[in-house]
Image: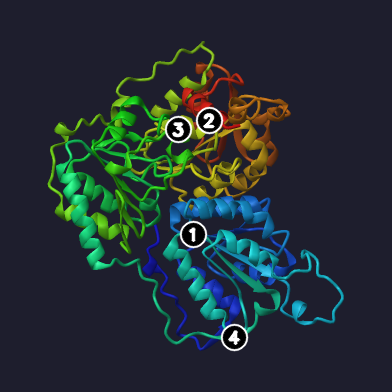
């Protein structure tokens, strides 16, 4: 369940005093967190002892980067995630994962142990502490560049610092950083008698009224309006408001790649994912030729919209984000996105969907998939089969590269979810993300699509997935190297040492795996994986090194022109 800001009710007022470490743990519990990911180290061990004694489950990962990726995916499904590491070698190893969460607006709490306060108070001590460079402000100065709040706790202000930092995480849906010196974990503190609740963003009434008036005027006049949904609808838990707007107006709706699954893709008004030239022809034409585009909560980045191929006429665009609405050259703020959607729903006149040229995505499944058992499996045929295999109780996770592009039209059913880094695009993200997503929603089975290059970066997290008894189906797309890079600009640097990928899961523990060369092989593998719902199933898909989706060819042609 996505956490609302009011969920941070900052419990604990029944006690007069506690310790700084215990106070922080209780605040994490108050957020509704059930898991926290991390790697131990001496500066954080005492705090981790407190975690072990709490209701939180401390999930140890194989390295800090993977812990960050896992916590990121967990947060995308639960509304907030947390990661706990030691200082220097731990915190700095985590930076890339936190940068991705910052870019894609993921609410993530980063907790790091640190050298004791006496280390940098004693100027006469000539010894430098391990895991440091001698600059005891280094880690905070680095992490504050990819967080919305970064603090080192102090004895006299720790509770206030904790409250304000956690509030910022929920308010802005981006990472925050809390550094707790080792000698402050057991340091006594007084619990505030009255702690403020975090409230949702508010709107300026006059700005809201004027923005709605201008938007309604353009939308009512338009003959072929369309809604384009983005990721902020996910992050702020306002997908329900979106559905109300869609069904009240009758407008067709598309989503960006990062906003994929913000509405069920089986909805009769959902026309597909708009990713510039990577979209299906109908979706691209319907969005780009619309006479008014209502863009809600989208990050207008290059890869999220097809790598410079999106043709969105700013003169026809109503672009509403969390706190601001832009209509042509007019800017209105502060306006909370949820308020803006509510007012549009109340004001707009219903239209007949039949008059708005709506071709729903569900028609893609009209023709059954006919297996050609002896035929070698190709990229295109594999993803066509996945379109029919994906169910309502699945979470699809797509790795950067061919997989995420090939999944643009993977239909997301009513209760299914989709996770993919469509903006930051860090290779290797998806396998640790599988761990985080599996713990966040154990009642959904994950379908993971990952290439061999990405897998080699973070493969050891298979061990943690098996350790926790999770049951994803991992599709390892073996096309012999870094395909997306090869398509942009080929060279020996895109080659990898070939592994026997399907044999790796048995190294880590109880699992089932196989390799697939033909369509018949794939059918047998899918049938077995469906039966084995109590364990990880690993299916290695063998493809030619240049067998990738046609959309990736188009994208890399655009990207390659600038290399």
How many neighbours does mark 2 have within 10 angstroms: few (below 14), some (14-19), or many (20 or more)? many
Q: Is residue 367 left or right of residue 65?
A: left
Secondary-structure class at tag 3:
loop
Looking at the image, is mark 1 or mark 2 earlier in the sequence?
1
Give the residue pinned by disc 4. 156
Give the residue pinned by disc 2. 402
Which one is in front, 149 or 526? 149
Looking at the image, is mark 3 or mark 4 earlier in the sequence?
4
Q: Are marks 4 and 1 in contact (CB under 8 Å)?
A: no
Q: CA distance from mark 2 to mark 3?
A: 9 Å
Q: Quadrant of residue 278?
A: top left
Q: CA distance from mark 4 to mark 1?
A: 26 Å
Give the residue pinned by disc 3. 407
Q: Is residue 268 above or below residue 519?
A: below
Which quadrant, please, contains the C terminus? Answer: top right
Give the residue pinned by disc 1. 174
Look at 23% across and 45% down and name the residue there. Answer: 246
Q: Position of residue 521 (x, y in %)?
A: 54, 19
Q: CA distance from mark 3 to mark 4?
A: 51 Å
């Amino acid at each position: 369940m996505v956490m609302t800001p009011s969920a941070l009710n900052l419990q604990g007022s029944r006690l007069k005093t506690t310790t700084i470490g215990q106070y922080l743990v209780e605040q994490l519990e108050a957020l509704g967190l059930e898991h926290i990911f991390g790697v131990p180290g001496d500066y954080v061990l005492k705090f981790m002892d407190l975690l072990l004694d709490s209701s939180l489950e401390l999930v140890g990962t194989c390295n800090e980067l993977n812990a960050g990726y896992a916590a990121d995916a967990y947060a995308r499904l639960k509304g907030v995630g947390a990661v706990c590491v030691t200082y220097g070698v731990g915190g700095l190893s985590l930076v890339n994962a936190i940068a991705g969460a910052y870019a894609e607006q993921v609410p993530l709490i980063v907790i790091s142990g640190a050298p004791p306060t006496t280390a940098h108070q004693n100027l006469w001590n000539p010894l430098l502490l391990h895991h440091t460079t001698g600059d005891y402000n280094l880690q905070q100065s680095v992490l504050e560049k990819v967080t919305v709040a970064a603090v080192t706790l102090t004895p006299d202000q720790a509770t206030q610092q904790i409250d304000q930092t956690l509030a910022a995480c929920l308010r802005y849906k981006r990472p925050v950083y809390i550094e707790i010196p080792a000698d402050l974990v057991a340091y006594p503190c007084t619990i505030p008698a009255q702690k403020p609740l975090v409230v949702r963003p508010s709107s300026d009434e006059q700005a809201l009224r004027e923005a709605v008036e201008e938007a309604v005027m353009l939308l009512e006049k338009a003959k072929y309006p369309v809604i384009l949904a983005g990721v902020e609808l996910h992050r702020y838990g306002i997908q329900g408001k979106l559905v109300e707007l869609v069904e009240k107006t009758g407008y067709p709706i598309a989503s960006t790649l990062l906003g994929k699954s913000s509405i069920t893709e089986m909805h009769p008004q959902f026309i597909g994912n708009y990713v510039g030239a990577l979209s299906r022809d109908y979706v691209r034409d319907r969005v780009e030729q619309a006479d008014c585009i209502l863009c809600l909560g989208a990050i207008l980045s290059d890869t999220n919209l097809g790598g410079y191929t999106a043709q969105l006429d700013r003169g026809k665009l109503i672009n509403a984000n969390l706190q601001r609405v832009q209509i042509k050259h007019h800017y209105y703020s502060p306006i909370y996105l949820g308020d803006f959607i509510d007012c549009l729903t109340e004001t707009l006149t219903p239209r007949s969907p039949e008059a708005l040229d709506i071709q729903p995505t569900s028609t893609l499944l009209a023709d059954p998939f006919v297996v050609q058992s002896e035929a070698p499996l190709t990229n295109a045929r594999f993803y066509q089969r996945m379109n029919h295999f994906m169910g309502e109780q699945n979470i699809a996770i797509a790795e950067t590269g061919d997989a995420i592009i090939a999944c643009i039209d993977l239909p997301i059913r009513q209760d299914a979810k989709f996770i993919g880094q469509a903006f930051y695009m860090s290779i290797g993200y998806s396998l640790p993300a599988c761990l985080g997503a599996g713990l966040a929603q154990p009642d959904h089975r994950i379908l993971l699509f990952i290439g061999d290059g990405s897998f080699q970066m973070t493969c050891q997290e298979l061990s943690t997935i098996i350790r926790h008894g999770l049951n994803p189906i991992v599709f390892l797309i073996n096309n012999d190297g870094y395909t997306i890079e090869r398509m942009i600009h080929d060279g020996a640097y895109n080659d990898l040492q070939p592994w026997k990928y399907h044999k790796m899961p048995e190294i880590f523990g109880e699992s089932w795996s196989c390799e697939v060369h033909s369509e018949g092989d794939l059918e047998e593998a899918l049938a077995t994986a469906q039966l084995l719902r109590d364990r990880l199933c690993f299916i290695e898909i063998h493809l030619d090194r240049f067998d990738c989706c046609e959309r990736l060819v188009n994208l890399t042609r655009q990207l390659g022109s600038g290399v």
